[in-house]
Image (cartoon, coloured by chain):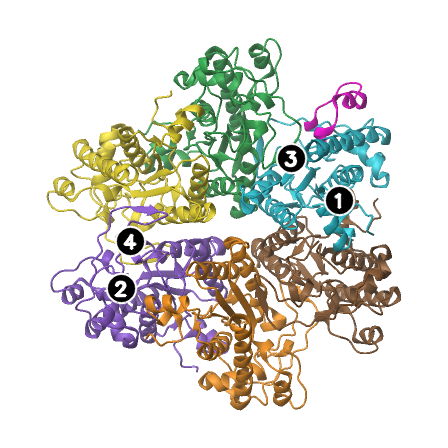
Chain colours: A green, B cyan, C brown, D orange, E purple, F yellow
Amino acid sequence: MSESVFYAELPWPVAEARVRDGAPVFLPLGATEQHGRHMALNTDVVLPTSMAVRAAKRVGGLVLPALAYGNRSQPRTGGGPAFPGTLNITANTFSLLVRDILCDLYRQKVRRIVTVNGHYENVWPTIEGIELALDAIGRDRCGDLRIIRIDHWEMIRPATLARVFPNGYPGIELEHASVLETSMMLALRPELVDLSQALHDGPASFLPYDRYPKPPAEVPASGVLSLTEGSSAEKGEWLLKDCEDGIVDIVNREFFAQ
Amino acid sequence: MSESVFYAELPWPVAEARVRDGAPVFLPLGATEQHGRHMALNTDVVLPTSMAVRAAKRVGGLVLPALAYGNRSQPRTGGGPAFPGTLNITANTFSLLVRDILCDLYRQKVRRIVTVNGHYENVWPTIEGIELALDAIGRDRCGDLRIIRIDHWEMIRPATLARVFPNGYPGIELEHASVLETSMMLALRPELVDLSQALHDGPASFLPYDRYPKPPAEVPASGVLSLTEGSSAEKGEWLLKDCEDGIVDIVNREFFAQ
Amino acid sequence: MSESVFYAELPWPVAEARVRDGAPVFLPLGATEQHGRHMALNTDVVLPTSMAVRAAKRVGGLVLPALAYGNRSQPRTGGGPAFPGTLNITANTFSLLVRDILCDLYRQKVRRIVTVNGHYENVWPTIEGIELALDAIGRDRCGDLRIIRIDHWEMIRPATLARVFPNGYPGIELEHASVLETSMMLALRPELVDLSQALHDGPASFLPYDRYPKPPAEVPASGVLSLTEGSSAEKGEWLLKDCEDGIVDIVNREFFAQ
Amino acid sequence: MSESVFYAELPWPVAEARVRDGAPVFLPLGATEQHGRHMALNTDVVLPTSMAVRAAKRVGGLVLPALAYGNRSQPRTGGGPAFPGTLNITANTFSLLVRDILCDLYRQKVRRIVTVNGHYENVWPTIEGIELALDAIGRDRCGDLRIIRIDHWEMIRPATLARVFPNGYPGIELEHASVLETSMMLALRPELVDLSQALHDGPASFLPYDRYPKPPAEVPASGVLSLTEGSSAEKGEWLLKDCEDGIVDIVNREFFAQ
Amino acid sequence: MSESVFYAELPWPVAEARVRDGAPVFLPLGATEQHGRHMALNTDVVLPTSMAVRAAKRVGGLVLPALAYGNRSQPRTGGGPAFPGTLNITANTFSLLVRDILCDLYRQKVRRIVTVNGHYENVWPTIEGIELALDAIGRDRCGDLRIIRIDHWEMIRPATLARVFPNGYPGIELEHASVLETSMMLALRPELVDLSQALHDGPASFLPYDRYPKPPAEVPASGVLSLTEGSSAEKGEWLLKDCEDGIVDIVNREFFAQ
Amino acid sequence: MSESVFYAELPWPVAEARVRDGAPVFLPLGATEQHGRHMALNTDVVLPTSMAVRAAKRVGGLVLPALAYGNRSQPRTGGGPAFPGTLNITANTFSLLVRDILCDLYRQKVRRIVTVNGHYENVWPTIEGIELALDAIGRDRCGDLRIIRIDHWEMIRPATLARVFPNGYPGIELEHASVLETSMMLALRPELVDLSQALHDGPASFLPYDRYPKPPAEVPASGVLSLTEGSSAEKGEWLLKDCEDGIVDIVNREFFAQ
């Protein structure tokens, strides 16, 4: 078990030694959220965890247990908090969870931390959780602590988008449960995708504002915000390679560069 | 005073009557945040307040006191929490403030509420504040309460952007303290802009990730994330007109349409 | 704009320089609360802000954006939380807001802070907010931080009260929306006062205890706790002069005395 | 034990029956706070508890365990949070404690509640605790719940003050650990008073503002804010009688009047 | 009064001197909770307070006011939160209360603290309160602060249990309001016990899991989880002696041993 | 994927249908905590998750993502919060996480919930999380919601303990990382156990109280609180069978019995 890339699969003496030797520690941030009729609810957990594992293997890092419950899904970005299947937690709870884990990693002498996020709505409560952890640790006592926050979709290169979408990229804002995520899931966990269920009732066309308590009616009934046509495991591998490379580059630049 | 568009400039019997008659109530959400060497720290308050006033006058609405302290500025979108001049509050405090105000508006029988936001980092804690208010009120007891959440930059039409940027729009992500905001401030409060101080050390080129506690060095020293060249009061009026019209259209569709 | 007494009307380099040079920073604390049929809901914002501006101009200080939403109004001191027009926030939210602003002022190297309060119910959550800020900063690491907390009604000299009330002062506890506040508003913002609407149904006579959830019936229907007769802009100027002088004296004693 | 006036000295079947029969329930609110060199730290607990007991016996009520830890003492009203001996809790904790107890009393079907407060700094967090409890219970579902909030010093009649202070009443603001409290303690718990230790270094003369983190130097070293001369058990009985009568009158008016 | 073992019965100069001289300070943690038809609701307050007093007298310590409101009673350990008579507070409030008191004791320079707990459900929120206090104080700045957390039932020696239960000890899990607590109450406060009301409807036989919102029906109607037969003041004294001795031994080992 | 026992491996239409048809939903509660030199840090996650999966398959249930970060480890039950490798979160965060998930399950119309806990320190914050969820939902509006809380070690039958420990059971309080957990891990994930690393420096002998900030020195250096000798996969299967059967029995009794 001492060879595992998963922090929690190690016995404590190995975990302690790896941290002491400077292993970067990756925290995947996900959600349990609808991803269309054709894909499993754990898409936002599988993707960042897999990317973290691939990157960790290349940089000698360790991967922590993923956060599987994400900040409230919103209509324009994931179908909304009331969509069937989706399980949300509040922003404050998510931030406190991130804060607590970061504070305890710091106490365990971890100084190189990378969060890899796969759920758009997690962006801001993650930032808040990091800020709260720095407040708690003391910004003037952080020493060499360095926390890197990555959203995986930022790692995809324009050239790859051009290959994936030869007819033009519809934009990240419509990419929930669409070609990018579907392709990567086909590459990683094909048994969790059933393209025959990918009803083509998108792409969604949202009004440029939010309404509460009832969101506007524009969320497609399928939960797919854009098209799934053209998804393939091969494309998924191109995308995953970008994410892996992007994370590795950042880790090398931030933690190991002279 | 009974003719004022500002809720707080009314005596209570008038405020009560206006609410009873269905006046939409606008809550501007801003920040006290650096906006370059050439512009005042209150830019994110002035813009949404002015837009709310213009829209309120057309739809018979009222404008509440703006929230002048915003959620923590971030390096890639506003220079970051440590930039001189910027005063931040935490996401949780911001959300609780929004929650409390919405709950009390509800208790005062206000059922038509529009938040107009001018500070990017407020987006998510505003959503959380609205969700918390709905939790507190009880989602099955909201009755005809309807809350509209608008970010003002979403109101600008593509045609206007094309006019403002004849050489191409650099993208909203670089627009902090740049041509859009500067032009609108020139139109509204020219005494709060000094273009001679607009040092051209942008545009910023950010790495696609965040780093804590010290952000990457890419924030331009001036705090301007993009260029200010080409800013003018005339362009500002075009933009403000879009925002005013956009808000009015939404209010009419949501509150007064059959 | 660099000459403005308002912190938020400055560009960041000027704000930074003014703070570095020791400018005292004033934070007005107000409320949006009924003030009788004859006066605007923003009375508790206008008064402390105006006093802070007058004092700041004399001592080279800066005035921050006022907090326009106050701690829950209470029946015996402001008509109560259920009075039409009044918008309350909770004590905890108010305290957190004060805490966050003070902590960020400290981070921005501000060491001379004056809160000027115009809403009685803010007294205790302001104290709590200050204590929480000191807890967060660390009481042994505050250095030369000094926070002064002023309630404006404490600045009025007995001699002035005697002039304003030649027939005897009815006591501060009945002064909500009455002669003192009305006179000062007449001096500062006469368009926000309409004495013809000042129904004389006071003075209120309260039982010496509180009752919940429904307060006793003694709150006058007008919201005026005492009399408005005899209010005048001239008297308002006497009172404002006392407040201005009182604040200036305190600032000089605390921050600039040898 | 079934005859005890103390709720917590009853076995549950008797407590349940007494509540079902409409017994008013009294919650004394105190503090552990310095009260001069001559008096015990529990003065603010002994006084409201004793008054509650006397009143409860006359109206068939029950007395709950007192809250012995009060909201932060302040320099102008009790010597301040840093005075030796004083143990403070935060306003938020105090409010949550009041909220929790009231919610559970409600769940236990108690509908007649009286808080009797003996510590000035508890006033506002008690109000907040009551408001939070009403929020949690639901203001439209409170039914016949009625909560009375009494500060004991409000119960003293002007005639009694005139008897106690034949040379004129110095005002409640200086009465911490002074003649009123000392006399009542002499009447109730003479072994907790040692007048030979009552150094006459008062009365305190406070500046009309607060300063943080270090309060102004005006707190008398003894902690006595005024004079103790003239304190006597006889006067204490007069005062206690006023408080007892005042509470009984309120209870009768609020709970038992037709 | 200066000889009292109760901290709050001292005037501040004596309390300050005693703390400076190293007196251990005891904080009793109790509850207001049903203890059968035969015993008062304050059993969990009386027992730890009495033990703390006995121990404090032997080691020169002081006893703080007990916390009389405990964390939510649970069905398997105390009858549950809905049992008549029981008054619960939330875990978070209990923890914050413990945190605040410990922080203020630390500020008052108390370095030897002993919590003596008499209510099973308080165990975990007390631990959390202690951890939160250490977080707030700063674990690297605690100096010689030492906090001892004792549950009184852990102090009873096996030999004593054998004497009390000559036919075998039924186990601590059934001991709520049963022979141990009843005997100690008979020794300490016999007027708060009425054995004639001790209906023998126990012992309880619980299923090994919890159910919410309605607990399983196994809580005996009397609230007695086991038998009261065989309770006596004499046995109570044996038990109290064990507790007193146990606490004294721990205090000597932890605070006064070389 | 529609056949998976894991909720998050389903697409939303299947999850929705399964819930509508009454599938019990299991939430495993674990920790990332040292479990001796011979076993992985995820032991408290693997065990309850595996048991939930086995039981869910028999009763037609679904298993949610496990909570992998547990409430603060304590010295007497898991080595303590400072043990290398252990990652703790606070009780409040853990409770809020449980509350949020339960509230959202309720909103998703799940009415049959079973928490299966594998980490002793989670017991009380789980109870609090459940109570907070019931408070938020409204105890009078829960309808047929039923939440079962199971600690897996309570499922082991005395007869099985007798078989596992032919020389006598040392008691659950010493069972952290010892024969019970080791045997079950050997049965489930043998690659995460290395018995050659099971140093025999136990069993631990704890003093009957807690000390903070530094715990007593009695935690064995290995983190094993008792012995691992005699652990085997075969015994693990006996124990797992008990747990599986116990959970199935409870589910049938509570959810499916007439």
Is C247 situated left or right of F98 in this image? right
Amino acid type at image mark 3 = Pro
Q: For the residues marked 2 and 3, what is the alpha-carbon distance in whole angstroms?
A: 60 Å
Q: Residue at x 76, y 31 (%)?
A: B243
Are the residues flagged by discs 3 and 4 in contact, CB closer than 8 Å? no
Secondary structure under tag 1 reads strand
Amino acid type at image mark 4 = Arg
Q: For the residues marked 3 and 4, what is the alpha-carbon distance in whole angstroms?
A: 53 Å
Is C168 situated left or right of A56 in this image? right
Q: For the residues marked 1 and 2, what is the alpha-carbon distance in whole angstroms?
A: 62 Å
Label 3 in the same subunit as label 1: yes
Percent coordinates x, y for residue A224 in the rendering: 53, 21
Residue B162, disc: none
Secondary structure under tag 2 reads loop
Q: Which residue is mark 4?
A: E76
Residues packed near mark 1 inside 10 Å, few (<14), some (14 to 19) or many (20 plus) = many
The label nearer to you, 3 versus 4, is 4
The label nearer to you, 1 versus 4, is 1
Q: Based on the displayed image, in which of its 4 quarters is residue B114 positioned?
A: top right
Q: Earlier in the sequence, mark 3 or mark 1?
A: 1
Amino acid type at image mark 2 = Ala
Amino acid type at image mark 1 = Leu
Q: Which residue is mark 1?
A: B62
